[in-house]
Image: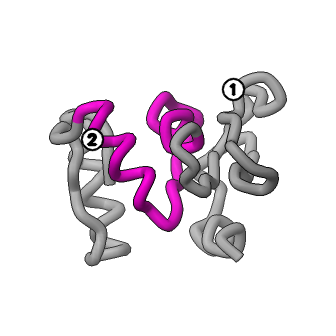
Amino acid sequence: VVGARGDSALAQVIRAGCPAALDLTGRTSLTELGALAARAAWAIGNDTGPMHLAAAVGCPCIVLFSSESDPALTAPLGRRPGQVRVLRRADLAALSAARVAAALN
């Protein structure tokens, strides 16, 4: 789990559902994020700079969009077809973990 130091409470919620996840919030530089993403099996997150970085280094991505942004305009660009998958829901809180997990296949 990556993000700013202020995201650590959310990281703990994620870790409660996935204890194997590492909490790296507030502990990675952009260079380190790029290196982690280049070796990751997947990156899952909302439309943020780190997701664009992950896509740029070739990491398969599932990018979550709410009604507040348009993936046609702001989705990360991948290096190959199918690398970036977009899931859109008006309210991201209503997007189930099962739907996100299904997008991994």
Q: Is residue 21 magenta?
A: no
Residue at figure coordinates x 48%, y 28% from the top left? 49
Magenta stretch encompasses residue 41: yes
Up-down relation of residue 65 to residue 1 (above or below)? above
Q: Residue at x 38, y 41 (%)?
A: 34
Kind of residue at disc 1: Glu
Q: What's the magenta bit mostly, secondary-structure-wise?
A: helix
Report the side of 31 relative to 47 (left or right).
left
Q: Position of residue 64 (x, y in %)?
A: 63, 46
Kindly identify which residue carries mark 2.
Answer: 32
| Residue 88, percent from left and from top | 75, 46
> Which one is nearer the viewer's eye here, 67 or 38?
38
Magenta-colored span: 29-55
Residue at 49%, 67% (x, y): give it: 41
Residue 23 seen? yes
**Which quadrant is the C terminus positioned in?**
bottom right
* Element assignment for label 1: loop
Dot 1 corresponds to which residue? 68
On the rendered image, what quadrant is the N terminus found in?
Answer: bottom left
